[in-house]
Amino acid sequence: MKNTIKLGVLSLLASFLLAGCVTTSGVSSDAVAHKTVSTKEMHDIIKKAAEQDGWRMTEFRGNAMIAERDGVVTTLTYKNAGITIDPPNSSLEDTVKDALNH
């Protein structure tokens, strides 16, 4: 009986821990493009707009860039359906949204 209770408590704790990990790994900021573009076009639009707004863009992975300006550093991940900015930055997000919606 004691083992059953211990196993039940451990299962319950494991469930909470797993649920907590899933909920904390969500998207920080999401700006979805309204027009359909390829990943390459998305990259070019984002990079050009951000650089024109004073951001220094560094290639990071196949679908990500690091944006730097005035001591602020954020990672911008993109795909043809939209972008994710982590940690969130409203200035960069506004710049990218404007570029993607025009």
Image (spheres, rainbow, N blue to C red):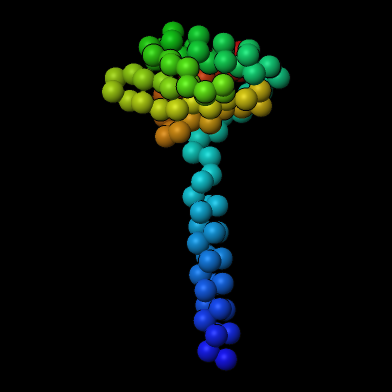
Is 12 left, or right, of 72 in this rendering?
A: right
Pick the residue in front: 49 or 12. Answer: 12
Outermost residue toward the front?
Answer: 3
Quarter of the figure that contains the C terminus = top right
Pick the residue in front: 34 or 85. Answer: 85
* Residue 32, image x, y percentages: 61, 28
The answer to whether any part of residue 93 appears in the image is no
Number of numbered markers: 0
Residue at figure coordinates x 68%, y 16% from the top left: 38
Quadrant of the rendered structure where residue 68 is? top left
Pick the residue in front: 2 or 30. Answer: 2
| 72 lies above or below 4 | above
Is 81 left, or right, of 21 in this rendering?
A: right
Residue at figure coordinates x 50%, y 13% from the top left: 47
* Residue 6, image x, y percentages: 52, 81
Outermost residue toward the right?
Answer: 36
* Residue 60, image x, y percentages: 47, 22
Residue at figure coordinates x 49%, y 50% from the top left: 24
Residue at figure coordinates x 50%, y 35% from the top left: 29
